[in-house]
Image (cartoon, rainbow, N blue to C red):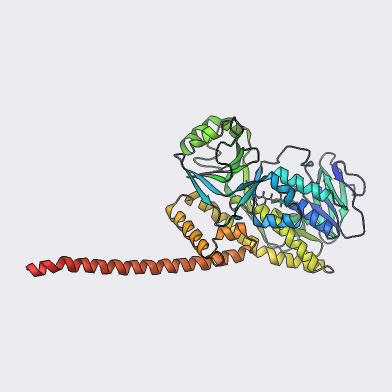
Amino acid sequence: MTGDDLSRPPAHGSTGSASSGAGPRAAIVGAGLSGSLLALFLARRGYRVEVYEHRDDPRLSKDEGDGRSINLGLSARGIRALRRAGLLGELWPHTVPMRGRMIHSPSGELTFQPYGTADHEILYSIRRGVLNALLIEHADALDGVTFFYGLRCVDLDADTGTLTLSDTISGETRRVEADLVVGADGAFSAVRRLMQRGRSADLHQEFLEWGYKELTIPPAPDGGPRTPIEALHLWPAHRALIVAHPNTDNSLTCTLFLPHEGEPSFASLGSGAEAERFFRSRFPDTLRLIPGLAEEFEANPVGRLVSVRTSAWHAGERVVLVGDACHAVYPFYGQGMNASFEDCLVLDECLARHPADRGAALREYQDLRRPHTDVLAELSKENFLELRDGLRSPARLLRARADLMLNRIFPRGWQPLYTMISHTSMPYGEALHRARRQNALLGAAAGVLSAGTALGAAAAVLHLRRRAAGPARRTG
Ligand SMILES: Cc1cc2nc3c(=O)[nH]c(=O)nc-3n(C[C@H](O)[C@H](O)[C@H](O)COP(=O)(O)OP(=O)(O)OC[C@H]3O[C@@H](n4cnc5c(N)ncnc54)[C@H](O)[C@@H]3O)c2cc1C
């Protein structure tokens, strides 16, 4: 370990102006979605910010990373944070609105389910790379923000806020001291592991037995879309699910979710030809939509899905976690990034409320966020089961229709859970609590209705029996 100070230029891939001024120094590990947005918020709060990323500058590479999803669904919480950061205007042209779910049946029939009853209740599809580049661009343009690439966090002293970074090319290490170290380094966060070393902290990590693979629906030969574009497309099936997000060039990016093992699974579909046979039997209309299915299936990696919850989001006043580093969730509620952006907003608000006591700010941030992201983890898991098993079930459809109808009649008083999670910024736990109350009411109402129906039916039976018995008595 050389222990160099990072005031000298980084080994490679750095952009931006050197940190200057007299504000506190923040070192963010990870220039992904939450790290780059938080850099922007912290700089505006007067911090000199350095962001350390072990990959190359995403603006220079077309590589989307380690098989992570290419597009993301942006919803109300993420939009709110990006609006606060002043980025929305520039973002919109890169998004495609998704007004609801388009469900594909095995016979090729399409059923559209709107996301909500109000016009604004829609999601927006955006490419991860475009969003990440835009966030970095804006943060990088601020005075006092510097991005360093090709540097991996390998050690941390949480008491002094000292990071050790290793150059991914030369292997050289250097140390950086900061007033605030932020772990924005994703689900397998090194900062989390190093911060919790020797401290009492619960860590719950769960891998889903399903993985995912990206496939592409290209635009039609005339440049138009091959399937209605302004929707999130879903192909539910037994032990398989495809989700497709639209892109601005009329293509759609599909994510195929399958179990890792068993029949069918990524293990059992050994070749592109087998995948094609499988798609023909389960999702016949996709053969027309995904012309490069066999080649892409063979070429693209299988991604893993992990859910992480942890009890310690900060260490004293020096280290804090944001985004997937403190709450990775399965992607089935489309909330991972949205919740991560919400973290950045809430952390910024807490720092504003406690300008002279960072320890109190970090404590409040953890107290405000953790109970709710724990709920999100549960909801994301439940939504996986619903998407997997019940999307086309008549009971689910009936329930969804009842929810939307009640929402139309009582727009303020009745909101489906999905609406509260995706189209509002109501804390996740509160949304769940309210949905449970509504469910109880609906259950009670159904009970009364069915009791009423049963009474009515009993009366009708009695009446019919009397009528049937009447003439018999008369003739008898
Ligand atoms: C298939 C799939 C679909 C998804 N769809 C959605 C969706 O529709 N909507 C939604 O809201 N969310 C979605 N998500 C979740 C979303 O991708 C994540 O929640 C989001 O990327 C979290 O951002 P982050 O910045 O915390 O972490 P990341 O995006 O993982 O960024 C972490 C960064 O840290 C860097 N890094 C890691 N370790 C180190 C180290 N030791 N040193 C230096 N740098 C390091 C990484 O290179 C990376 O750039 C989806 C996820 C998946 C897997």
Where residue 334 sits: x, y (%)? 61, 52
Q: Is residue 216 among what the camera can see?
A: yes
Position of residue 440 in the picture relative to residue 323 (left or right): left
Position of residue 11 in the picture relative to residue 210 (left or right): right
* Closest to the observer, 114 or 353: 114
Position of residue 165 in the picture relative to residue 81 (left or right): right
Q: Quadrant of residue 60?
A: top right
Q: Residue at x 59, y 61 (%)?
A: 420
* Closest to the observer, 259 or 218: 218
Instruction: Name the residue furthest left.
Output: 476
Height in image: 39 above or below 300?
below
Q: Is residue 322 among what the camera can see?
A: no
Q: Which residue is drawn at 81% across and 50% down?
A: 139
Height in image: 376 above or below 451?
above
Q: How many labels does the image show?
A: 0
Q: Quadrant of the C terminus?
A: bottom left
Q: Quadrant of residue 298?
A: top right
Where residue 343 sits: x, y (%)? 71, 59
Where residue 423 sits: x, y (%)? 61, 58
Where residue 9 sits: x, y (%)? 91, 44
* Closest to the observer, 470 or 273: 470
Q: Residue at x 58, y 31 (%)?
A: 292
